[in-house]
Amino acid sequence: MMHNYRRSTAQAMTAAVLLALPLYCASLCFAPLAMAAEADGNRYGAWTPPDAQAAASQNKDVNALVKELNALVREAESSRAANPLFLRDLKALAARYDRSMDNRVLFDDFSDNDYQRNPEWSVTSGEYWVEQGYGLRSKVVDAAPAGGGSAPISKEKLALSILGAVLQGANKNSDKNSGNSGSAPVPAVSPSAKASAIETRARINNAFDATLEMSSWQAQGTFALGIHQGLGGLGYRLEYTAGQNAMLQLVRVTSSGRAVIDSKAIAALEDQKIHSFNWQRSVDGSMNISLDDKAVLSARDGSFRDAFDGVELASQGADVIVKSISVAGSR
């Protein structure tokens, strides 16, 4: 009987040790943290997740890789050691992974249905409003004839205008019969429409990262995103020409005039879906533009070396709704 008692006592002690072992190990692991926290006067110290430290280290590695890649591209570009198209693709790849520009200086998604505050946009021509659920939209106004009076209309033009009105009415009836509905209201657009423009002030570094989300609703006209210096609109413009011959152009605007830096024909965007433009400019003047995460334009221009101070949205006969815009610069 004494033997059974000793055996049960040993089993109980073993079980107690096994239960206490995890707590003892935990106290050994957290003792240094507790001692450091008590030394600072706090019972509990700050805790950083291990994966957060790994992510920070990974970001540093990616940034270092991007810097080295950009340096190699510049060297190959200056010595003409590689195909220009290959270099453009490399720069676009580096731009997609470059996260060094994290100082956001401008953001607006117009979700407050007010473009006159936070940030404040100023209309310089035309008329603007927020299309609820869609974004910022401009009203297209027909240009007045030169001299301010009404120009005489010939019989041939009058007949053509009447025929056009009849055909337009037939198209409207056809759309109704086909069951098209649910889209945003479409204002009348004329090829001779006045330009509408709206701008906001923002302190933008010479190197920046701008993202614009927009949708195009009519296959005509030109829409532009401008980042400029001063009041004269000097700077750079990213211009989209809508329609069958859709095109994207990167334009430089100086006191000497306009100059197209790079251009490319693209597929028309008039599918009433949201498309995203990303425009990155580095400290050496290299610029890369992507459309829906695909590289489109690439150029290098050092005409402007100072910081920029304004963003402009402009439309010449185009019906575009801006969903959001964001601009960041390096710290």
Image (tube, helix red, strand yellow):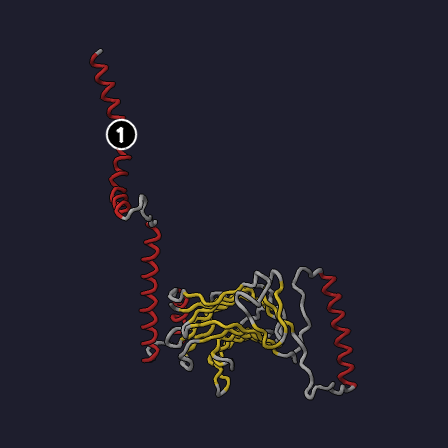
Residue at the top extreme, as displayed? 1
Which residue type does callout 1 highlight?
Answer: Leu
In the rendered image, residue 8, in percent from the top left (x then y), is placed at 25, 18
Please state if 165 lies on the left or on the right of 257 as rendered: right
Q: In this view of the protein, can residue 265 be seen by the observer?
A: no
Above or below for 33 versus 118: above
Q: Quadrant of the C terminus?
A: bottom left
Element type at mark 1: helix
Q: In this view of the protein, which residue sits in the foreground, 88 or 83?
A: 88
In the rendered image, residue 96, in percent from the top left (x then y), is placed at 41, 66
In the rendered image, residue 167, in percent from the top left (x then y), is placed at 75, 73
Above or below for 328 versus 194: above
In the rendered image, residue 103, in percent from the top left (x then y), is placed at 41, 66
Above or below for 9 versus 191: above
Labels in figure, total: 1
Q: Quadrant of the N terminus?
A: top left
Residue 216: name its quadrant.
bottom right
Residue 113: name its quadrant.
bottom right
Q: In this view of the protein, can residue 64 be seen by the observer?
A: yes
Please state if 19 lies on the left or on the right of 99 as rendered: left
Which residue lies at the image location 75% right of the left edge and 84% below the top edge?
157
| Residue at the disc numbered 1 | 18
